Structure formats: structure tokens, C-alpha cells
Image: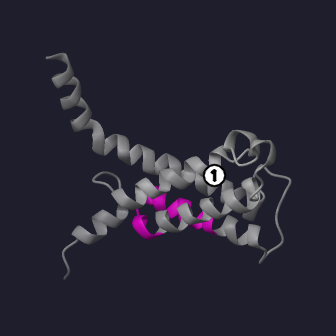
Amino acid sequence: MISARIRELAARGEPYVYAALRIVAGAMFAFHGAQKILGWHSHFMPPAGSQLWIGGLIELVGGALIALGLFTRPLAFLVAGEMAVAYFQFHWKLAIADGMWLPGINKGELAVIYCFLFLFIAAHGDGEVAALGRRMRKTPSA
């Protein structure tokens, strides 16, 4: 009885919780890009055109658009790939000794979490709530 009620409440709240997840994840990701591209709350700004700068641009633009619910699937897939590259290239570095392949040791937890979170978002899409892309698709053409 209680578990059925909990499942019902969870099912009713799922679109709103997913929208919150997409918006918060996109905004947080955009903030990482803003640190790299705009220097917000950071002392490090990579040189323009460098790999880190391009990654920051993907984070800033991709994260903002994902938060807004625009081009969610392709952008989430792109940024998931960026985080996979970040993990392998900058955290793991293909080192096996001393547990360096473990995210807890090589400080790659956030890259791994973002990678799988954005893969989930790529699979799920805009969602039903608070997504501009969904609203644009529903607008009847004149």
C-alpha cells in the first residue's frame, strides 16, 4: 500500500525532477566553462584556441543550452564525450601503477559522473517540463 503510493508520487514528480536535474547539471557545467573562458572565479584561463579553451567553450555553450533544453540530445552526447576524453587524457593518463586508473585516486570522479549523467540526458532528451526545445517543436507553423 505504502510502496504503491510512493511509486505513484515518484511517477508524478519524475518530469519535474528530471527537469531540475537537466537544468542544474547544465548550469553547473556551464559554470565550469565560464571559469575557463571568462575567468569567472578562477585564476586560470587557458590560451585561446588550446584544447582546454575549446573544452571550456563546449562546457559554457553546451551546458547553457542543455540547461535551457535546446539541442539537448546531441549536446549532451557531445559533452559526455568531452568528459570521457577529460578522464582518459587528464585524469587517468593510462597509468596503472598505484591505482591511478581509479577515479578516487586520480581526481577524476567529477569527469566520470558528468560523463554518465550527460549520457543519461542524451538518452532521455529534453524532458516534458521547462525545455525550450520541446516548446519550439510544439509551436504550430504559420
The reply, left or right, for residue 25 in relation to residue 20 is right
Q: Nearer the viewer, residue 38 or 88?
A: 88
Residue found at the far left of this picture:
1
Res 120 seen here: yes
Residue 36 lies, in percent from the top left, at 75, 61
Query: For the magenta stretch, what is the residue range?
Result: 58-74
Q: Residue at x 50, y 46 (%)?
A: 24
The reply, left or right, for residue 107 in relation to residue 61 is right
Q: Quadrant of residue 18?
A: top left
Q: Quadrant of residue 134?
A: bottom left
Residue 105 lies in the magenta stretch: no
Residue 119 lies, in percent from the top left, at 46, 57
Res 70 seen here: no
**Circle 1 residues within 10 Å: few <14, some 14–19, many ≥20:** many
Tag 1: residue type? Answer: Ala
Residue 73 lies in the magenta stretch: yes
Residue linked to disc 1: 111
Q: Does dot 1 land on a helix, a strand or a loop?
A: helix
Q: Residue at x 84, y 71 (%)?
A: 47
